[in-house]
């Protein structure tokens, strides 16, 4: 992938925020850090060991620190990137800005939901990025995330932030 993970992490913090205690997201799902879904992904034993946190109970009681949040987010980025490239290998050939757009969307809604944007994907496969941009905005996701969707849609269309 061509995009810079560090830059992407900064964009994620801008879009997702960083909350160091467990909170419920807009769907009522327990979440921590930079959008880590505790219901679906949780925090693995290996991650807890790396963070030197003895159990999930401690996470719920005391939260995590900023370095922990960044570590978990970088792990999430790697997982999402692998999932996205597995189902849409064309992403690897795109420019870094459009890769960032799709990674941001995948991180936000999950790869399975992103794959349902069939008209957007059809446009992407034909390198019709203006059409892909319009399809992004014609979605429930765009209505839910508002300004974020406008920024990402414009970046998909122009190839620049």
Image: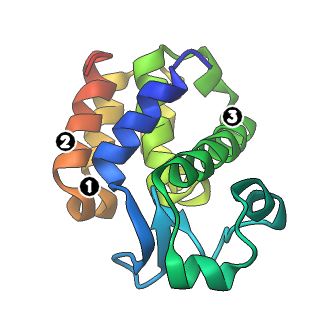
Q: Name the residue at 49% across, 27% down.
A: 6
Q: Do the residues labelled 3 and 2 touch (CB within 8 Å)?
A: no
Q: The residue tagged with tag 3: helix, strand or loop?
A: helix
Q: In this view, does 100 lie above or below 23?
A: above
Quick check: 14 left or right of 128? left
Q: x, y percentage for residue 105? A: 43, 46
Q: Can you tell which mark lies on residue 85? A: 3
Q: Is residue 127 visible?
A: no
Q: How far apart are marks 3 and 1 (CA)?
A: 23 Å
Front residue of 121 and 24: 24
Q: Do the residues labelled 1 and 2 touch (CB within 8 Å)?
A: yes
For residue 85, above or below residue 159: below
Identify residue for label 1: 142
Residue 63: x percent and y percent?
A: 50, 72
Q: Determine the residue positioned at 18% across, 55% down.
A: 146
* Secondary structure under the numbered disc 1 in the rendered image: helix
Q: How crowded is mark 1: few (under 14 residues within 10 Å), some or many (20 or more)?
A: some
Nearer to me, 131 or 42: 42
Task: Provide the residue designation for mark 2.
Answer: 150
Residue at the spot 56% in from the left edge and 15% down from the top edge: 2
Quadrant of the image containing the N terminus: top right
Q: How crowded is mark 2: few (under 14 residues within 10 Å), some or many (20 or more)?
A: some
Residue 129: x, y in percent? 35, 24
């Amino acid at each position: 992938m061509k995009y810079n993970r560090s830059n992407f992490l900064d964009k994620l913090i801008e879009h997702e925020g960083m909350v160091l205690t467990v909170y419920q997201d807009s769907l009522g799902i327990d979440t921590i850090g930079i959008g880590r879904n505790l219901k679906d992904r949780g925090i693995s034993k290996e991650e807890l060991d790396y963070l030197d946190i003895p159990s999930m109970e401690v996470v719920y009681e005391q939260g995590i620190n900023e370095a922990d949040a960044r570590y978990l987010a970088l792990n999430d980025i790697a997982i999402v990137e692998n999932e996205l490239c597995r189902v849409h290998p064309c992403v690897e050939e795109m420019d870094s800005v459009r890769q960032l757009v799709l990674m941001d969307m995948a991180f936000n809604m999950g790869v399975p939901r992103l794959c349902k944007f069939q008209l957007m994907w059809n446009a992407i496969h034909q390198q019709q990025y203006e059409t892909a941009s319009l399809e992004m905005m014609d979605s429930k996701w765009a209505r839910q995330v508002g300004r974020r969707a406008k920024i990402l849609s414009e970046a998909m269309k122009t190839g620049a932030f």
